[in-house]
Image (cartoon, helix red, strand yellow):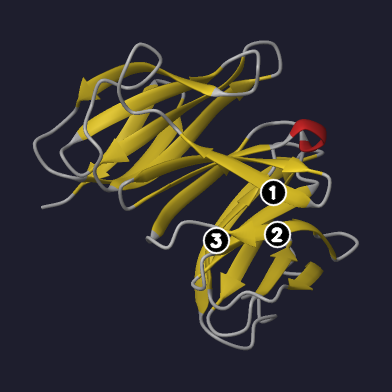
Amino acid sequence: YFRGHTDDISCITSVEKGGRMIVATGQLGKGVTCVWDPLTMAALGAVETKQKTIQQIAFTGDARLLVTVGSDNGISVVGWANKRILACAKSDPAVCFGIKTTFNSNDLSILAVGDKFLRLWSIKGRNMVSNKVVTTGPKGIRGTVQRFLCIEKFESISSGAWFAIGCTDGSIYFVKQDVGGGLVGDKEVKATTRRIQTIARHAAGTGGRKSD
């Protein structure tokens, strides 16, 4: 077991770097995030932000940076190897249910999903700026504003990123990152009549877990 935390673990994420898996976990209480090797259980780094309980956490695709969202609605971008907080801001007051990042730390975008919001973040110097993703109209998803419960990312260096978002009404919304760095609605799929709580990718496509 990894024993680097001082309180209960609240969230977990992982990324592959150089042929090995790296795990990051957040905890309740103080905004502490630990990065560790799941094979040896050795600690690779620990970062303490000014956030309260870490609720959501995500690596960038190149594993250089971590993005964390706290229960105080704070969002931070952290260089975990040197324990440096690169940028931080206040996110939506509503609950955030998931975050995903784009591939490149040098041109970072973060998509946060939550209770009636989809928000795209980027870094400008030490500041973070954001825009809500359009959910209706010619460049938007032709759906309804609701609780967006989960998110998964699909990405390649050549074609960029697109995201699958699980919704309360059982729909999956697909959005793509355009050449300007923004997001545009691609399509909506009605997957089930019940809310989608978890969504994950695998070789055959997209899989999810619905509520009973």
Q: Which mark is residue 88?
A: 2
- Per the image, the residue denoted by label 1 is 128
Where 52 falls versus 87 (above or below)? below
Q: Position of residue 123 (x, y in %)?
A: 74, 42
* Residue 76 visible in the shown view: no
Q: Secondary structure at mark 1?
A: strand
Q: Residue at x 40, y 28 (%)?
A: 134
Q: Position of residue 151 (x, y in %)?
A: 42, 40
Query: Left or right of 144: which side holds 156?
Result: right
- As measured in the structure, the alpha-carbon distance from the residue carrying label 2 to the one carrying label 3 is 20 Å
Q: Secondary structure at mark 3?
A: strand
Q: Identity of the amino acid at label 3?
A: Ile
Quadrant of the rendered image containing residue 37: bottom right
Q: Secondary structure at mark 2?
A: strand
Count residues near mark 3 (Cα–Cα under 10 Å), then give few for <14, some for 14-19, many for 20+.
some
Nearer-N-terminus badge (2/3): 3
| For the residues bearing labels 2 and 1, Cβ distance under 8 angstroms | yes
Q: Identity of the amino acid at label 2?
A: Cys
Nearer-N-terminus badge (2/1): 2
Where 97 falls versus 175 (above or below)? below
Q: Which quadrant: the N terminus?
A: bottom right
